[in-house]
Amino acid sequence: MRSRAARTKEFTVYVVPAWKWKEFIAFELIGGTAFYLVCRKIAHSELFGIAANIALPQMLKYIMSSYRKQAKDAPQPPPS
């Protein structure tokens, strides 16, 4: 398998914008952990904390994407 891949000498390069991985770190890792800890303390339930860890970062991403779309569609002042 490796010899065949080495013969073609082709590979794929994926470019990931910095805002995508920063968004992932902020929402999924930091936000998910924070929601898990807060909801676990509030409800005294491990299961509720896990559900919040999964659902709330997805909700935040959805809300932020709608704001990003509104900002993109907003009228811009003419260049001076």
Image (cartoon, helix red, strand yellow):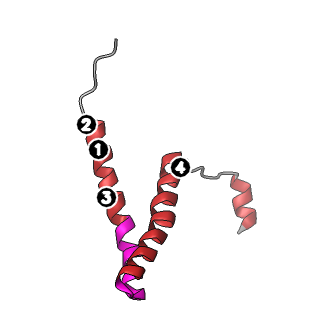
Q: Magenta-highlighted stretch: main secondary structure? A: helix
Question: Which sits earlier in the primary sequence, circle 1 or circle 3?
Answer: 3
Q: Do the residues labelled 2 and 1 touch (CB within 8 Å)?
A: yes
Q: Where is residue 5 in the image (x, y as percent from the top left)?
A: 69, 60
Q: Residues within 10 Å of mark 1 (few under 14, many from 20)?
A: few
Q: Name the residue under label 4.
A: 16
At label 3, which amino acid type do we have?
Tyr
- Foreground label between 3 and 4: 3
Q: Position of residue 3 (x, y in %)?
A: 75, 64
Magenta residue check for 46 = yes
From mark 4 to mark 1, how far is it between C-alphas? 19 Å
* In front: label 2 or label 4: 2
Mark 1 = which residue?
69
Image location (x, y in percent) of residue 74: 24, 34
The residues tagged by marks 2 and 4 sit, at their Cα atoms, a distance apart of: 23 Å
The residue carrying pointer 4 sits among few (fewer than 14), some (14 to 19) or many (20 or more) residues within 10 Å by Cα, namely few
Q: What residue type is labelled 2?
A: Asp
Quarter of the image for residue 72 reads top left
| Callout 3–callout 4 Cβ contact below 8 Å | no
Residue type for callout 4: Val
> In the rendered view, would you say 45 is above or below 75?
below
Q: Which of marks 2 and 4 is nearer the N terminus?
A: 4
Residue under the image location 34 percent in, 11 percent down: 80
Check residue 73 in the rendering and tell me which mark sits there, or answer none. Answer: 2
**Label 1's element?**
helix
Residues at marks 1 and 3, CA–CA distance in whole angstroms: 11 Å
Q: Which stretch appears magenta?
A: 43-57
First-in-chain label (2 vs 3):
3
Type of the residue with mark 1: Lys
